[in-house]
Image (tube, rainbow, N blue to C red):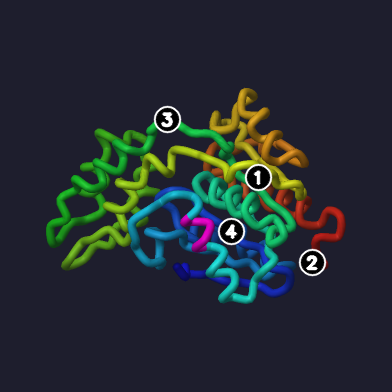
Amino acid sequence: MELNVVEAGSGPPLVLLHGLFGSARNFGTVQRRLAVHWRVLALDLRNHGGSPHAPGMGYAAQAADVLETLGRQAALPAAIVGHSMGGKVAMRLALEVPASVPRLAVCDIAPVAYPPHFREYARAMAGLALAPGLIRAAADAALAPTVPDRAVRAFLLQNLSLGARPAWRIGLAELEAGLPDIEGWAAPPGARYEGPTLFLKGERSDYVRPEHRPAIRGLFPAARIVTLKDAGHWLHADNPDGFVAAITSLLLSDGVSSM
């Protein structure tokens, strides 16, 4: 599947992969800053943003989408930066085609299975009455009992198109059906990625825990695990300065800027 791409800048390719219910535009601020030195391609993963909707959210399929898209964009090899679900896609891609990924940054996610945190969110979104004339305040109020955090509701509602025919722009049914795959993780048998790798975790987030380190080291033996201060799970939004500095440090190490 060829994915929607938002591109900025010129130079060595750098790819940004968003998390669940996100989109390429979530990286707007950091993309513009990184585009000073790199050709930055932010992708909408399948069933998100402007990309096609299709069943199946397994990481092998998502990694294949990214690889096909980058091939069509003449953007391989490319450094890959993935956040949350996008981080798992990035890990899968690096493990499957390491020669195509000279640098890897995995942001606030580990190569492990996670509890089903988002299933109630998906059910609440699917249950929203999409009546003509629906306004954002009413949609926000309808989600509030299930999604009490206002910032999370605002993030989810970015995917809602209002107007005469309100609709979710994302493939919500496909995402809801694919949540077990999104929550899970299975590496390709015997795979390891030996390239330079950054695991960047948010200081206020518990997605990457000390007990995850053996799994990280087993698959990514060159990994550095760095905590980004003043950041939670959406670390590129919470601390864009620190995020850009960490990614830049990874990309400029050992001459990667000339890849």
Q: What stretch is highlighted in magenta?
A: 61-65
Give the residue number, with chain letter if any, for mark 4: 16
- Neighbourhood count class around disc 1 (C-alpha, 10 Å): few under 14, some 14–19, many 20 upward: some
- Which of the pair 224/194 is nearer the observer? 194
In the image, residue 168 above or below residue 38: above
Amino acid beneath label 3: Pro
Q: Look at discs 4 and 3 and give the one toward the viewer.
A: 3
Give the residue number, with chain letter if any, for mark 2: 259
Residue 129 on image: x %, y %: 15, 50
Q: In screen coordinates, is 169 left or right of 226?
A: left
- Neighbourhood count class around disc 3 (C-alpha, 10 Å): few under 14, some 14–19, many 20 upward: few
Q: Which secondary structure dominates the residues rendered in magenta? A: helix
> Which residue is at 78% across, 51% downward?
249
Residue 124 sits in which quadrant? top left
The mark nearer the N terminus, 3 or 2, is 3
Amino acid beneath label 1: Ala
Give the residue number, with chain letter if any, for mark 1: 191
Amino acid beneath label 2: Met
> Which residue is at 36% across, 55% downward?
158
Let me know if residue 33 is in the magenta part: no
In the image, residue 230 above or below residue 103: above
Residue 22 on image: x %, y %: 44, 53
The mark nearer the N terminus, 1 or 3, is 3
Give the residue number, with chain letter if any, for mark 3: 115
- Which of the pair 64/164 is nearer the observer? 64
Q: Is mark 3 on a helix, strand or loop?
A: loop
